[in-house]
Amino acid sequence: MRRWIRLVLTVAVLTTAAGCAPAVRSDIGDGDLTNDWAGIATPKVFVPRAGECHPVAAGTVGQGTEYTPVDCGQSHEVETVFVGIFTGVYGVPDHSPAPGSSSRRAARTDCDQRVHEFLGDDWQAGRLRLEVVVPSTTAWNGGARWYRCDVGEVVSMQDRTFVARTGSLAGALDQPSPLRWGCFNPSANAAGDVGILAPVACTEPHQSEFAGLYLEADLPYEEFAANADQVHEQCRRVVADYADLPVDDDLRHRFGTIYDYPFKDEWDDGNLAVRCLLWRDEPPLTRSVRDGGTAALPVRQG
C-alpha cells in the first residue's frame, strides 16, 4: 500500500510542475514528497534452522507455511541436525531437486555424514531414519536453495513410520542404547521371506542378531533386488567380521543371513546401505556372537 501512495504523489508533483506551481512554503516541508520514505526491503528467503524439532515429519519436500518447530523436550517426530545450501559441489539446479537427481544424492551424502557425527554412528545401525527435505517448487522459485537433514525414531526395521519421542538424539548411538539394533526372533512365510523381526534381549533365546551393514554398488534398484545370492554373500562377510570368524569354505555352514535394504525412493536418492543379520535356527543362541569366534558359531552338521 505504501508503494502505491508514493507513486501517486510523485505523479501529482510532476503534473503540477508542468503548469504554474505555487511557491513552496518552508513551514510545511521541503517540497520533495518522496525523500523521506524508507526504501522497500528486499524480501528474505525462508531458511530452516538446525537444532530444532518438529511435531510432524515434513516428508521430502518442505513448506515454509508448515514450519512449526518445537523445543526438543516436547513431543516430536524428527529433529533437524543440519541445514545446507545447494551451492558449489552440490550444484544449483534450475528447479527444486527431483528424486534421484545428482543434487538430491549429493545432499543425502552430506546428510549421512552430518547425522553420523551427530549420532555417533551410522543411523542405519539403529531404529532411526534419515529424511532429506528440500524446498517446494514454489519456495525454490522464490529463491530457496536449502536442504534439511532430519532424523527421527521409527517403529521397527520393517515399519519405518516415525514415532513421537521427547529429547534430542544427539549422541544416541555413541554408546549402548535401546535404539541400536540387537537380537531378534524372525518369523518367515512359506517362501522364506521374513515377515516380522521381533526384538528380544540377546541373553534370551533368539535366532538372529544384527551384525552391521555394507554399502552396495551403485546399481539400478531392480538389478540389486534381483541378486539375492550376491547380497547374502556380502552379508556373510559382514557377519564374519562381526563374530571374528575365518572367511573360508565353512563360513556358509555356520549360519544363514537375513538382510534389509532401503525403499526404492531412498535407493534412487543414494542410500545404498544394506543391513545384515545372522540367522541360526537350532540350537537357539543365548548371547551375542560378537567377537565370539568359531565357538560361538560352530559348523552345523547335516
Image: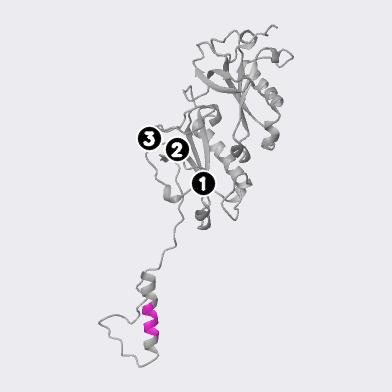
Question: Coloured how?
Answer: one colour
- Which span of residues is magenta-colored? 8-14
Magenta stretch, main secondary structure class: helix
Position of residue 239 relative to residue 264, above or below, is above
Label 2 Cα crowd, 10 Å radius (few <14 / some 14-19 / many 20+): many
Towards the viewer: 159 or 153? 159
Residue 173, percent from left and from top: 50, 27
Towards the viewer: 189 or 148? 189
Q: Residue furthest bottom?
A: 20
Name the quadrant containing residue 266.
top right
Position of residue 16 relative to residue 54, above or below, is below
Residue occupied by mark 1: 61
The three-letter amino acid code for the residue at tag 2 is: Glu
Using the rendered image of the protein, determine whether residue 122 is visible from the camera's viewpoint: no
> The N terminus is located in which quarter?
bottom left
The three-letter amino acid code for the residue at tag 3 is: Ser
User: Does the magenta portion include 136?
Assistant: no
Q: For numbered disc 2, what is the local secondary structure?
A: strand
Residue 54, percent from left and from top: 42, 40
Marks 3/1: CA distance? 22 Å
Residue occupied by mark 2: 79
If you read the primary sequence from the N terminus, does the residue marked by circle 1 or circle 2 appear first?
Answer: 1
Marks 2/3: CA distance? 11 Å
Which disc number belongs to residue 116? none
User: Does the magenta portion include 11?
Assistant: yes
Marks 1/2: CA distance? 15 Å
Residue occupied by mark 3: 75
Residue occupying the point 47% across, 43% down: 58
